[in-house]
Every structure is written in structure tokens, then in C-alpha cells.
Image (spheres, helix red, strand yellow):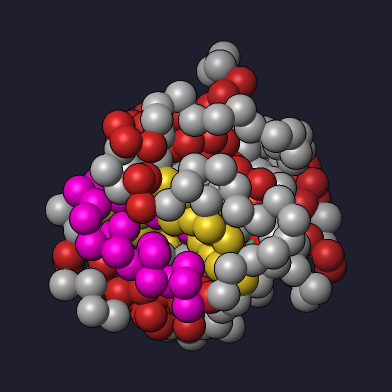
């Protein structure tokens, strides 16, 4: 049994107020650019321009940055999110399609869902948000891109240090011999089988109740612990353990900024909340960074 911290969990992190960071602003030259107290308590968001400028200046001086992304980053590529107005989990039950129990009960139904997503994602390409993050990696000495997305678009955009917390939709794994392979077929058929042993294949993604790859999770936690700035982009911050990485970064003294269309349960934790489209804000942040 893996410790619970490794399991993909749905319940929202309690929306509790976080005590002040454990390190002081002057111990982190990057965090010192902005006050570590949340400036948004009274919903008086500073103008977008101020936030972009402040964040860009902080990024310019940063050595270690972590970025946590979610489905919102791929929304402008035309890939549906999970919890938005047209989100996948508004129309489908996650428990019917994204759990090991669902696959054991009806693998054909689960493959139907994943074949539909494969064919949709296969027609999409990266958007300015993915491109901006790939460019950011080129100018920040140490940037870890931690993603919950399984679409592979960060890699397509040219990001190299990508930690895919929830796997990759193009990967398949044999349920009998455990062999993994990349397969970009848009349609894998009703019951795809392993070429090595004939066992039933499953999507190489992490389902609810399953363990995250401990090696990837460890790298993500380390990146969050060490970073001076964490950008949290396009995620509803309700799925664990990904959502708690912002807490890890905060307790390491990092400056936190969220880019999202709307506030999330983690907004309270942020030094900056930039409300808007990732594909518009991220390119502006990277502009003039080098
Ligand atoms: P969600 O669908 O829960 O959240 C998407 C977030 O993106 C929301 O907060 C939106 O407001 C925001 N958003 C939408 N369009 C945006 C845009 N153009 N720019 C910026 N933000 C935008 O997706 P995740 O948080 O990624 O797991 O969901 C986490 C996990 O839950 C997924 O990895 C998936 C899901 O169930 C599995 O399937 C195992």
C-alpha cells in the first residue's frame, strides 16, 4: 500500500487560511518584490498591468521557478476542461470513466471515452500559453513544469523538463505484463491488447484512487520546495496531491501567482491573482524577460 499522499484524490483541499510563510521576505530575494501578505483579501485586485510587471521583474531575478498547470492551459487549444461550464465531469461521471473500478467493470466503455479524447486531442495543437512556458524555460536557469494534463501539449510546445503527474494519454500499459508503450493512434479499438503477451491494454494515465508515479511526484515536490516563484496556471486546485504543491512552495518561502479565469480555493494563498486567459497573460509575462 502506498501512503495516502501518493493517491489521486478528488476532495477539495479545505479552503483554510494559511499561516504566514515560514521564511521571511528578505530571506528570499525574489519574494521580496511583493509583500507576502495576500493583497486580495478585500477583493481589491491590483490592476493587471501592475501584477504582470511585478511578476515579470520577479521572474527576471529568479533562479528556480516551478509552474503547475491544469486543463485551463489547454482550453484555448480547444480541449475541454473538467470542471468548467462545458467541463467533462459536468457531462460524465468520473467514477464511471476514470477509476480502476470502472475499467474493471467495463473496459470497453472506458476505452470508448479515451478513444474519443485521443481523437479530439490528436487534432489539437499547442497554444500561446504552452509556447510562452516553453520560452520561459529557455530564460530561467531552473524551471520545472509540473502538469496535471495528459495531452502532451507542453512537450509538443518544446518544454523539456515536464513532470506529467497524471500520465500521458498517448501511453498505454499492459494490465498483464505491465509493458508500457507510446501509441498515438486516435482509436485504439474496443479492447486493445498487448503485442508482447496479449493482455488487455489500459490508458497510461492516473485514475482517481490510484497512486501517482512516486518518482515524478518526488521530483514535483522537490521542485515546489526549492522554487523561488511558483506559477499556478489553469487549474481549479481541487485535486490532490497536485493542489497541495502550492502549499509546499509557500512553506518554502516562494512567491506564488495564480493565472486563471476565476478564483480557486488556493487563491487566498497567492501573492498575485491574475484573472484572465493563460494564452494572453503568459505571453505578456515572457515578453522582454530574456
Ligand atoms: P479543471 O477542469 O478542474 O479546472 C480548469 C481550470 O482552468 C478552472 O479553474 C478554469 O477556471 C481554468 N481555465 C479555463 N480556461 C482557462 C484559460 N483559458 N486560461 C486560464 N484558466 C482557464 O482542471 P484541472 O484543475 O486540471 O484528472 O483538473 C485536475 C484533474 O482533475 C485533471 O488532471 C483530471 C481531472 O479529473 C484525471 O483525469 C485523473
Q: Quadrant of the N terminus?
A: top right
**Can the viewer see residue 119?**
no
Q: Residue at x 58, y 68 (%)?
A: 46
In the rendered image, the vertical position of residue 25 relative to residue 173, given as above or below: above
Q: Residue at x 23, y 72 (%)?
A: 289
Q: Quadrant of residue 136?
A: bottom left
**Residue 63: x percent and y percent?**
20, 48
- For residue 284, side relative to residue 18 (left or right): left
**Residue 242: x percent and y percent?**
54, 42
**Can the viewer see residue 270?**
yes
Front in this rendered view, residue 128 or 187: 128
* Residue 132 counted in the magenta span: no
* Residue 68 counted in the magenta span: yes
Front in this rendered view, residue 137 or 247: 247
**Residue 263: x percent and y percent?**
70, 60
Q: Quadrant of the C terminus?
A: bottom left
In the rendered image, the vertical position of residue 122 relative to residue 259, given as above or below: below
Q: How many marks?
A: 0
Front in this rendered view, residue 148 or 40: 40
**Residue 167: x percent and y percent?**
46, 49
Quadrant for ligand 1 reads bottom right
Q: Quadrant of residue 135?
A: bottom left
In the rendered image, the vertical position of residue 106 relative to residue 12, given as above or below: below
- For residue 285, side relative to residue 205 (left or right): left
In the rendered image, the vertical position of residue 265 relative to residue 157, given as above or below: above
Q: Residue at x 39, y 64 (%)?
A: 54
Please report the bounds of the magenta region as a residue range. Answer: 49-70
Amino acid at each position: 500500500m502506498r501512503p495516502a499522499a501518493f493517491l489521486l484524490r478528488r476532495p477539495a483541499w479545505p479552503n483554510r487560511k494559511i499561516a504566514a510563510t515560514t521564511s521571511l521576505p528578505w530571506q528570499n530575494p525574489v519574494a521580496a518584490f511583493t509583500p507576502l501578505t495576500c493583497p486580495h483579501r478585500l477583493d481589491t485586485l491590483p490592476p493587471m498591468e501592475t501584477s504582470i510587471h511585478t511578476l515579470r521583474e520577479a521572474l527576471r531575478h529568479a533562479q528556480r521557478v516551478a509552474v503547475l498547470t491544469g486543463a485551463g492551459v489547454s482550453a484555448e487549444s480547444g480541449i475541454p476542461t473538467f470542471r468548467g461550464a462545458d467541463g467533462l465531469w459536468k457531462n460524465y461521471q468520473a467514477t464511471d470513466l476514470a477509476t480502476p473500478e470502472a475499467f474493471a467493470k467495463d473496459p470497453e466503455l472506458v476505452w470508448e471515452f479515451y478513444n474519443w479524447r485521443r481523437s479530439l486531442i490528436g487534432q489539437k495543437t499547442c497554444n500561446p500559453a504552452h509556447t510562452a512556458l516553453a520560452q520561459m524555460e529557455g530564460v530561467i536557469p531552473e524551471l520545472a513544469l509540473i502538469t496535471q494534463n495528459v495531452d502532451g501539449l507542453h512537450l509538443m510546445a518544446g518544454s523539456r523538463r515536464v513532470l506529467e503527474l497524471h500520465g500521458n494519454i498517448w501511453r498505454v500499459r499492459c494490465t498483464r505484463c505491465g509493458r508500457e508503450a507510446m501509441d498515438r493512434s486516435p482509436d485504439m479499438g474496443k479492447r486493445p491488447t498487448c503485442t508482447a503477451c496479449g493482455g488487455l491494454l489500459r490508458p497510461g494515465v492516473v485514475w482517481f484512487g490510484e497512486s501517482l508515479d512516486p518518482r515524478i511526484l518526488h521530483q514535483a515536490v522537490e521542485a515546489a520546495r526549492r522554487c523561488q516563484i511558483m506559477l499556478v496556471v489553469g487549474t481549479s486546485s481541487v485535486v490532490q496531491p497536485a493542489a497541495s504543491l502550492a502549499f509546499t512552495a509557500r512553506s518554502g518561502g516562494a512567491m506564488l501567482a495564480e493565472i486563471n479565469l476565476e478564483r480557486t480555493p488556493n487563491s487566498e494563498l497567492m501573492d498575485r491573482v491574475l484573472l484572465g486567459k493563460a494564452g494572453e497573460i503568459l505571453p505578456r509575462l515572457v515578453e522582454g524577460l530574456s
